[in-house]
């Protein structure tokens, strides 16, 4: 891109921001989430694409249909904001995306001892998956991870725990207000 | 004399690891009291290094009979630079973990070694010297210490290719207090297969592979270790960190936030997680109990299962953060994976609680931590448990004792309202550190005989 194009792009973005953006007072700037991935505030992204084993797509669909959104193991992790599985290219490849708090790699051993079955039931459908207990699993994930080009988080400064805690506080305050109004 | 090891009962039928090949420090508790020296050594020429190793070998004790007190022992470990300086073959060098090769200073962003702890503020020794060997002499009498130190120094002979960069003395009296005046180093993980017969109330021993290379870990898998097998097996990795303790600043913070001497002692205990005597808050939440603190049979026999609101011991207390025992967990964590064998020793004098002006004297701790994955464990502890509050559901709060902070917050659940203390500082500042490899005795011999 030449210099003038660059200036024009910057100008267009500034104008669009002036006309259309609003400011919530949060810091949305991007940092690195470790060896790969982006982070905004406390929330990081992990995006990975991998080939599926033959029959892998069928098994995955069945698992996720049975779960119907209730992935108790994911709730148990306590740092997952969301998790998305998309099948690509005639069900031969998987796109896995998640937004999570902090870092994933220091926790890889905890996954291996705490939720090994859940991890292997889902990712065992991926070609070459070494198993969550394998010493090679961290590198396997990194090898398939693609750092996002863009990353925006609506509430970058709150972890899942922070949100759960604040939700409880608001519910408590509302209850106190309701009780007071009844007097 | 109350020895630390009386609580640990040895059962020879439970030995499944090669105790006679493993260096003593890995399994042996510090003697009580202790006297010792840490020596940082540079090898200027491979053959001189190997000669030194040959001379040192007979002085280095194994972990055999770790349950019996040793009057004095010597321990030796190597940095990655040190293994290179000894001329280890290239395929051996490349089999070491990346984090170990990079070294502690280079991993600063992964260790949250920033601001006060930033390597750019470290002591020159750790930044500009070639630390190749970290050795320690530790003894339980002054005479034994001096005798062993003399034997150690004699192995250097007149060799000019061996350079003693620095030697630092350390020690603690029978009360085992650190420079803050708190008994510490009480709790250590027990290792399966070491011959430990666990008394009731103590943690189930952790799989040997978490602490010693070449054995299955908690997942049942033997993790990769340095090659060939004679070099890696029965070895381990060590974290060495020198902390300068800001005791006067800590005392000042306590005084500014308390109105009576009793309140001061309580707040200090809430921050540490134990009273000065070592008595755990969970067992004696209102006031110190020196008899309990000194009783090795009882001072570690507790869990947080009956204190899930943190009203006795706050979630943010240093001891609870670093060893959550049966605390309710807010994120998926396996407490058994992040334990480390601690062999920290104190240097400098104790500052009494009434002193609130920094006299600028050197005092603090040589933190020595041992694990088969010492680098990964330190990165986890530093980033997740010491400098983050998410796993204890405390937002941005950091560990009040080892966290890096300027205007830090400490949350203390009390009745009826939670108390929030402000303006915590970095009370222990990292002044330097290294990652070291602790070879087995047969590996030391193998290295000393390399061509």
Image (spheres, rainbow, N blue to C red):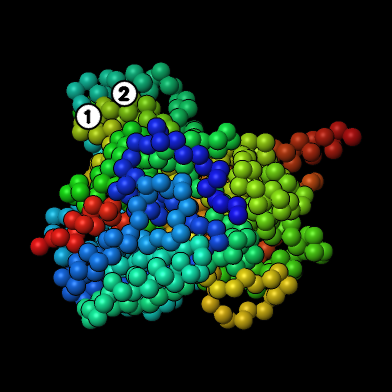
- Residue drawn at x 39%, y 32% as measured from the top left: B13
Which residue does the numbered mark 1 point to in the structure image? A52
Q: Left or right: B301 with respect to B47?
A: right
Q: Position of residue B64 (x, y in %)?
A: 37, 47
Establish if B129 lies above or below B106.
Answer: below
Write the residue at 37% across / 30% down. A116
B315 to the left or right of B385: right
Q: Is residue B118 in sight in this rendering?
A: no
- At 32% from the left edge and 37% from the top edge, which residue is drawn? B216
Indicate the quadrant containing the C terminus of chain A: top left, top right, bottom left or bottom right.
Answer: top right
- Residue B5 place in picture, x, y as percent: 52, 47
Quarter of the picture containing the N terminus of chain A is bottom left
Q: Which mark is residue B165?
A: none
How dense is the environment of label 2, judged by Cα within 10 Å: few (below 14), some, or many (20 and up)?
many
Q: Within the image, what quadrant is residue B422 found in?
A: bottom right
Give the secondary structure at mark 2: helix
Give the residue pinned by disc 2: A60
Is B91 rendered above or below residue B144?
A: above
């Amino acid at each position: 891109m030449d210099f003038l194009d660059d200036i024009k792009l910057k100008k267009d973005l500034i104008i669009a921001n002036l006309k259309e953006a609003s400011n919530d007072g949060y810091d949305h700037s991007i940092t690195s989430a470790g060896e790969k991935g982006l982070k905004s505030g406390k929330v990081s992204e992990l995006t990975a694409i991998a080939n599926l084993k033959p029959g892998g797509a069928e098994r995955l669909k069945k698992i996720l249909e049975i779960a119907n959104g209730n992935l108790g193991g994911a709730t148990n992790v306590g740092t997952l904001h969301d998790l998305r599985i998309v099948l690509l290219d005639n069900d031969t490849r998987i796109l896995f995306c998640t937004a999570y708090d902090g870092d994933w790699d220091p926790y890889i051993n905890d996954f291996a001892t705490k939720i090994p079955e859940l991890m292997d039931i889902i990712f065992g459908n991926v070609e070459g998956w070494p198993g969550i207990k394998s010493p090679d699993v961290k590198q396997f994930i990194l090898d398939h991870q693609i750092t996002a080009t863009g990353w925006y988080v609506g509430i970058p400064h709150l972890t899942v725990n922070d949100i759960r805690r604040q939700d409880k506080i608001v519910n408590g305050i509302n209850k106190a207000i309701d009780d007071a109004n009844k007097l | 004399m109350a020895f630390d090891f009386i609580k640990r009962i040895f059962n020879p039928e439970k030995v499944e690891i090669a105790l006679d090949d493993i260096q003593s420090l890995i399994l042996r508790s510090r003697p009580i009291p202790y006297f010792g020296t840490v020596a940082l050594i540079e090898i200027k020429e491979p053959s001189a290094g190997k000669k030194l190793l040959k001379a040192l070998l007979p002085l280095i004790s194994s972990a055999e009979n770790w349950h019996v007190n040793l009057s004095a022992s010597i321990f030796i470990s190597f940095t990655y630079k040190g293994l290179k300086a000894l001329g280890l073959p290239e395929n051996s060098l490349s089999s070491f973990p990346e984090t170990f090769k990079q070294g502690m200073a280079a991993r600063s962003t992964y260790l949250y070694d920033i601001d006060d702890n930033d390597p750019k503020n470290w002591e020159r020794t750790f930044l500009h010297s070639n630390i190749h060997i970290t050795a320690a002499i530790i003894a339980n009498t002054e005479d034994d210490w001096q005798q062993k130190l003399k034997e150690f120094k004699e192995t250097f002979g007149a060799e000019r290719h061996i350079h003693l960069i620095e030697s630092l003395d350390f020690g603690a009296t029978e009360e085992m207090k650190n420079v803050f005046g708190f008994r510490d180093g009480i709790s250590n993980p027990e290792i399966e297969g070491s011959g430990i017969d666990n008394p009731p109330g103590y943690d189930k021993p952790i799989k040997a592979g978490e602490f010693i290379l070449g054995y299955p870990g908690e997942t049942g898998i033997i993790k990769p270790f340095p090659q060939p097998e004679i070099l890696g097996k029965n070895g381990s990795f060590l974290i060495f960190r020198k902390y300068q303790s800001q005791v006067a600043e800590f005392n000042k913070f306590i005084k500014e936030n308390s109105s009576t001497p009793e309140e001061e002692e309580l707040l200090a205990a809430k921050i540490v997680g134990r009273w000065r005597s070592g008595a755990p808050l969970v067992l004696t939440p209102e006031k110190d109990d020196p008899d309990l603190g000194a009783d090795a049979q009882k001072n570690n026999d507790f869990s947080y299962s009956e204190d899930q609101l943190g009203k006795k011991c706050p979630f943010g207390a240093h001891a609870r953060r670093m060893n959550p025992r049966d605390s309710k967990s807010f994120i998926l964590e396996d407490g058994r994976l992040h334990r480390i064998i601690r062999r920290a020793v104190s240097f400098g004098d104790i500052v009494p609680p009434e002193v609130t002006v920094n006299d600028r004297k050197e005092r603090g701790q040589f933190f020595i931590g041992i694990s088969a994955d010492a680098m990964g464990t330190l990165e986890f502890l530093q980033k997740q448990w010491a400098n983050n509050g998410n796993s204890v559901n405390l937002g941005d709060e950091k560990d009040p004792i080892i966290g890096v902070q300027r205007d830090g917050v400490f949350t203390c659940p009390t009745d009826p309202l939670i108390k929030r203390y402000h303006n915590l500082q970095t009370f222990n500042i990292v002044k330097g550190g290294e990652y070291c490899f602790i070879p087995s005795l047969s590996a030391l011999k193998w290295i000393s005989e390399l061509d």
